[in-house]
Image: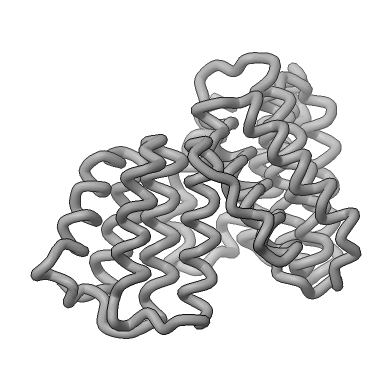
Amino acid sequence: MDFDSFLSRAWDQHAADAAGVAERLAAALDDPAPALVTDEEQITPLAHLVHHVYGAHLGRWADGRALLRRLAAHPACSAGGAASAALARFQASLALCEGAADERAAMTASDRIRVTALAAANLAEHDTARASVLFSEAQAAADAAGLDAADATHRALAVMGNNLAGTLEEKTSRTPAERELMIAAAQAGRRYWALAGTWLETERAEYRLAMTWLQAGDPAQARHHAQLCLALVHDNGGVALERFFGFEALALAERAAGNAAGHALAVAQASVAFAALDEGDRGWCQPTLDKLQAFSA
């Protein structure tokens, strides 16, 4: 299997079978099978997967660090390159999660913040209290650092905020601390995408906030952010795919609020947006529309 196929398949399977993907990652990097990675550009995406699976899903900090050290020793990984820097951040994040060491002091301000946010995301399902402290610490450090708007830290914080919120939304039940972290993470995603992204990322962060507030049990806030999402879509050309998901969020908010008429109207508008999608997007959006329409039946 070539590298791209291996990576794509692993990402597809990791949520349902994190342990199995971890085994395949370890086997793929064992001697004498280093041929999966053939050039330096492949190291960072593979390291990202290792960090996420061993960290966020399994909490196997030491095992993840060991695998990242194998990648760092790979002949394709040059000292001082972008892959080497990414590996250092991922290893420092797992060490911070484990409590084995805090390697941030020797790093640049940008890297310290990114490591802190990475560790917070890893800990979301393992130690919510520490995750909350670290995520707050990362944001405070970003505020104090006076970073340029184009600094990669802002994008990293946006991604971490989105991922944290999405992870916690998927839980069937949440503690009060998890609810607070979920909301704070979605709000951070919106804040930092406004700095690091385009209108598209900002609009999707509003969608994320709408879904987060739904899971938090506040349909009024969910409606507010769904409307902000749709306003951004309207102001930027009314892209059908974005309208579809904006109206999905609005329909769910109206349903949660007990507003049958508002829910029906939003479902009808989602159906109009769906009809404007190209054939490829219709295929993966159909289950979402079916679920909305089932609620209306």
Give the image location of residue 7, x and y in percent.
31, 64
Horizontal arrangement in the rendering, residue 187 relative to residue 242 (left or right) = right
Res 240 visible: yes
Position of 227 relative to 240 (above/below): above
Horizontal arrangement in the rendering, residue 148 relative to residue 79 (left or right) = right
Q: What residue lies at 29% left-to-right and 75% top-to-bottom?
A: 74
Query: How many badges with numbers are in the image?
Result: 0
Position of 180 relative to 240 (above/below): above
Q: The C terminus is located in which quarter?
A: top right
Q: What residue lies at 56% left-to-right and 58% top-to-bottom?
A: 275
Q: Quadrant of residue 257?
A: top right
Res 238 visible: no
Front position in the image: 187 or 151: 151
Front position in the image: 65 or 173: 65
Q: What residue lies at 9% left-to-right and 70% top-to-bottom?
A: 32
Q: What residue lies at 82% left-to-right and 61% top-to-bottom?
A: 194
Give the image location of residue 69, x and y in percent.
35, 61
Position of 68 relative to 278 (above/below): above
Give the image location of residue 8, x and y in percent.
32, 63
Give the image location of residue 75, x and y in percent.
28, 81
Front position in the image: 204 or 277: 204
Front position in the image: 161 or 297: 161
Residue furthest to the left in view is 32
Q: The N terminus is located in which quarter?
A: bottom left
Horizontal arrangement in the rendering, residue 178 relative to residue 41 (left or right) = right
Position of 291 relative to 234 (above/below): above
